[in-house]
Image: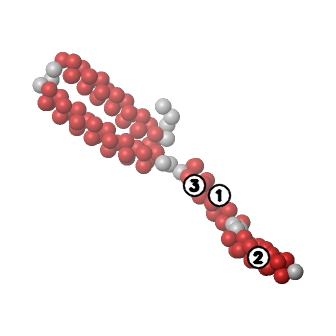
Amino acid sequence: MILSLATSAVAIVLAIDARDNSADNDDLNAISERVNQIETGSTADFDATAFEARLTAIEDQLSQADGASGGGGDVSERLDVLEGDIEELRDQISELESGNNP
């Protein structure tokens, strides 16, 4: 009998705890709104800024490498290709920022 009373008391405490810690409709609505904001929000601005900074750093490294190598033919050709790739990426970033699809 004492065991059944103790079990009942534990069950009541667990039920109250579950009720207090459960999400209500307001919580679910707030989470749903946040997910919608993230889905419809533009993260392209943040990504574009990060890409822009990274591309600028790569361009600087390429310029330094070109100056250090004395403009050798093979290295110079590779740098030209890389600079072209960087320009293409910049164009794609601009398109993302303006909302156009490539």
Q: Disc 2 to disc 3, how far (Cα)? A: 41 Å
Q: Residues within 10 Å of mark 1 (few under 14, many from 20)?
A: few
Residue 10 numbered mark, or none: 2
Can you tell which mark lies on residue 37?
Answer: 3
Residue 83: where, in percent of width, then height? 29, 29
For the point 49% across and 41% down, the residue is 99
Q: Which amino acid does label 3 sit on?
A: Gln
* Mark 2 or 3, closer to the camera: 2
Q: How crowded is mark 2: few (under 14 residues within 10 Å), some or many (20 or more)?
A: few
Instruction: Judge from the rendering whether residue 84 lies leftward or rightward of residue 14; answer left or right.
Output: left
Tag 1, which secondary structure?
helix
Q: Is residue 93 left or right of residue 75?
A: right
SS of the residue at dot 2?
Answer: helix
The residues bearing labels 1 and 2 have C-alpha atoms spaced at a distance of 34 Å
Quickly name the residue at label 1: 32
Check the picture and name the quadrant holding the N terminus: bottom right
Point out residue 24 in the picture as x, y percentages from the top left corner. Answer: 71, 68
Is residue 60 rendered to the left or right of residue 54? left
- Above-or-below relation of 10 to 25: below
For label 3, the SS is helix
Residue at left 80%, top 75%?
Answer: 7
Residue 19, labelled with which disc? none
Amino acid type assigned to the residue bearing label 1 in the image: Ser
